[in-house]
Each structure stands twice: as C-alpha cells, then as structure tokens.
Image: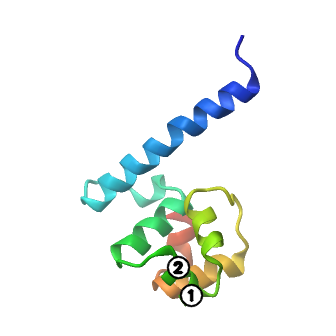
Amino acid sequence: MTTLRTVALESVEVAKPVRRLRARLIRHRINVDAEDMSLGERVYIARSSRGWSQRKLAERCGLSECGVRMIEIEQKKDPRAHTIGALAQALQLSLDYLWFGR
C-alpha cells in the first residue's frame, strides 16, 4: 500500500537528480527555455555562471547563505518581493527574468 509519505519521499528522491540534470544541460548551453525553469534553477544558473558561491551571493544581496540555498533547492516556494529584488540586483538580472524567465 502506497502512503502519502511514501509518494512524497519518492518525489524528493527523483526531484534532486532531475534538477542536477537540468542544471548540467543549461551549463552546457543545451537549449532549455528559461520560462520552463523554476526560480531556484534561474538563480542557481545565474550564480554559478558567474563563478560565485552561495556565500558570495548571500553577501552581495544581504541574505543569509541558508536563504540562498533554500531558494535554489526550492524549499522556499514563495520568497518575498524584496528578496527577489535583492537577488536580481546582485546578479544584475531583471525582476521579470527571475520571476517568470522572460
């Protein structure tokens, strides 16, 4: 019998390798549309393409390292607008790109 907890654990186990694969595809410039990426994936790609650690991004935008990590791994589903604004400013990206991938 499959319980809700089992299904949730299975989805977590599958989600991590899928995120890594998508990130790898994007890093190698394989065509992945930004609109199809999550906010966390867009932040991760922008940060890693600059060669920054999560700590460096956190320092530049005034967030905690844990806060940046939680956004990237999508533990924080709906970050506040000022948080996204700080990330956009630090990464020199538009708010529209971070929110919607456009």
Residue 102 in sight from this viewpoint: no
Q: Quadrant of residue 24?
A: bottom left
Single out the residue that lies furthest toward the top.
1
Q: Position of residue 96 (x, y in %)?
A: 54, 73
Instruction: Kindly identify the residue that appears in the image at 53 percent across and 56 percent down.
Output: 38
Instruction: Kindly identify the residue that appears in the image at 66 percent across and 56 percent down.
Output: 75
Mark 1 surroundings within 10 Å by alpha-carbon count, few (fewer than 14), some (14 through 19), many (20 or more): few
Query: Quick check: 1 above or below 39?
Result: above
- Determine whether label 2 and label 1 are within 8 Å by CB: yes
Query: Quick check: 7 above or below 93?
Result: above
Query: Quick check: 83 above or below 15?
Result: below
Mark 2 surroundings within 10 Å by alpha-carbon count, few (fewer than 14), some (14 through 19), many (20 or more): some
User: Alpha carbon of mark 2 to alpha carbon of mark 1: how far?
Assistant: 6 Å
Q: Quadrant of the N terminus?
A: top right
Q: Position of residue 2 (x, y in %)?
A: 70, 16
Can you identify the residue that label 2 sits on? 55
Q: Residue 27: give its label.
A: none
Identity of the amino acid at label 1? Glu
Residue 54 in sight from this viewpoint: yes
Count the marks: 2
Can you identify the residue that label 1 sits on? 59
Instruction: Kindly identify the residue that appears in the image at 47 percent across and 81 percent down.
Output: 93
| SS category of the residue bearing label 1 | helix
Q: Position of residue 43 (x, y in %)?
A: 50, 69
| SS category of the residue bearing label 2 | helix
Q: Position of residue 3 (x, y in %)?
A: 74, 20
Instruction: Kindly identify the residue that appears in the image at 43 percent across and 74 percent down.
Output: 47
Lateral position of residue 41 relative to residue 24, left or right: right
- State the residue in front, 18 or 31: 18
- State the residue in front, 34 or 29: 29
Identity of the amino acid at label 2? Arg
